[in-house]
Amino acid sequence: MLFSENIKIAFRALRANKMRSILTILGIVIGVATVVALLSIGEGATASITSQIQSGGSNLLTVSPGKMQMGMGGQSRQASYLYYKDYQLLERGLTGDIAAMVPVYQSNYTVKFGNESFNTNTVGVMEDHAEVRSFIVTEGRFITDGDNKSQALVAVLGDTVAHDLFGTLSPIGKTISINGLKFEVVGVLESKGASLGSPDDNIFIPMETGYNKLFGEIALHNGKRMVNNILVSVTDTDSMETVSAQVEYMLRRSHELKPSDELDFNVMSQSDTLETLNSVTQTLTIFLGAIAGISLLVGGIGIMNIMLVSVTERTKEIGLRKAVGATKNQILTQFLIETVTLSLLGGIIGILLGVAIAVTFSVTGLISSVITADAILLAFFFALIIGIFFGLYPAFRAATLHPMVALRYE
């Protein structure tokens, strides 16, 4: 029998029981759609995370306090600190391909202008901060070295803060209040959206102004100025590991840590952050993919069940075909084609549905998705394997029926 004839018989059998066929492939449709949608959304999330981290600065090393301990009530609290003197030590001692290095200290304060008032982060920074973090000033200017030396009461606003305080008005030259202290707005930053380390919800002021006029005692620990982070911009990606090792060596000595002591600080590169976040994304995708796999398994069992019923219903037909010369392999092929046809039909519908779900997520802005050929091919491959695996037993059962027994079946 020709292969095309087998296909026609398969579709004829499916059409004879339309509702049963639809319900049979439903599990495959759901499973394949879930696989395509999850892989597309996972790929999009990975691309989005990569873009966000890279937009935070080129070849960036972030030095931060590294120890937390449990306090009263089960809440964690900071157990180690970075100090402004650590920044000064690194500034004097680091050698190699260093483009710029800046300290960061931030705290939350109430900001006011007119009738508008809300809490937001106020960040003390140096003049190179915008370069290190790849910030773009859309209006006015950023903090300068002169602002720090003179402890000027000036501020640069993130895009969201500027919009919330001033609406469509230009903030440049206006005076805002931060914790009761008056600051002149000298600049506004370009929006970076909901990205890691976005400046949109922050206000930036000169570091020296912050320490001496705003932060007060909360920025001190044992009489020393604290910093939240030290950002090191490295000129060459190949030098990241070398510079990171230098930072660790210098701070280990400064903090009087023995070789066996646990570090009380962290040195994270962009690649480290990407690896960590991508690992979380991949783990979540695998977990959700496993759920999709259960749907595929259930769909496969449904196909096997319906094909076994089909073999029983068509026992006399099988007997007649064998009586007129159909071989065991021809019967096996016929039923296997029917099973694979069911599975692939469900796979195609599932792929279309999965793509539609992924596109809908992207269009609505809920989460970005990237539809790849790999995701579609993987889903199609799984649908094919499910059809073959769960179709073998019913097909083998049909092929091994004895003609005389089949012909006598009522």
Image (cartoon, helix red, strand yellow):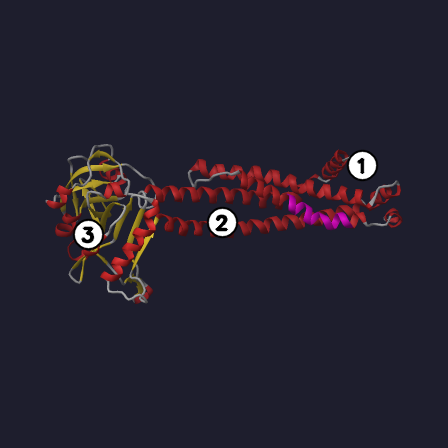
User: CA–CA distance between discs 2 and 3?
Assistant: 45 Å
Highlighted magenta segment, given as a residue range: 384-396
In this rendering, position of residue 331 left or right of residue 127: right
Q: Are marks 1 and 2 in contact (CB under 8 Å)?
A: no
Whether the magenta-drawn stretch holds residue 392 is answered as yes
Q: Which mark is residue 307?
A: none
Q: Could you tell me residue 53's position as x and y percent?
A: 35, 44
- Nearest to viewer (mark 1 / mark 2): 1
Amino acid type, mark 2: Thr
Q: Residue at x 73, y 44 (%)?
A: 336
Q: Which residue is mark 1?
A: 1
Q: Earlier in the sequence, mark 1 or mark 2?
A: 1
Q: Which residue is mark 2?
A: 285
Amino acid type, mark 3: Arg
Q: Residue at x 16, y 44 (%)?
A: 177
Amino acid type, mark 1: Met
Q: Which mark is residue 92?
A: 3
In this rendering, position of residue 354 left or right of residue 277: right
SS assignment at label 2: helix
Q: Could you tell me residue 372's position as x and y percent?
A: 51, 38
Q: Quadrant of residue 258?
A: bottom left
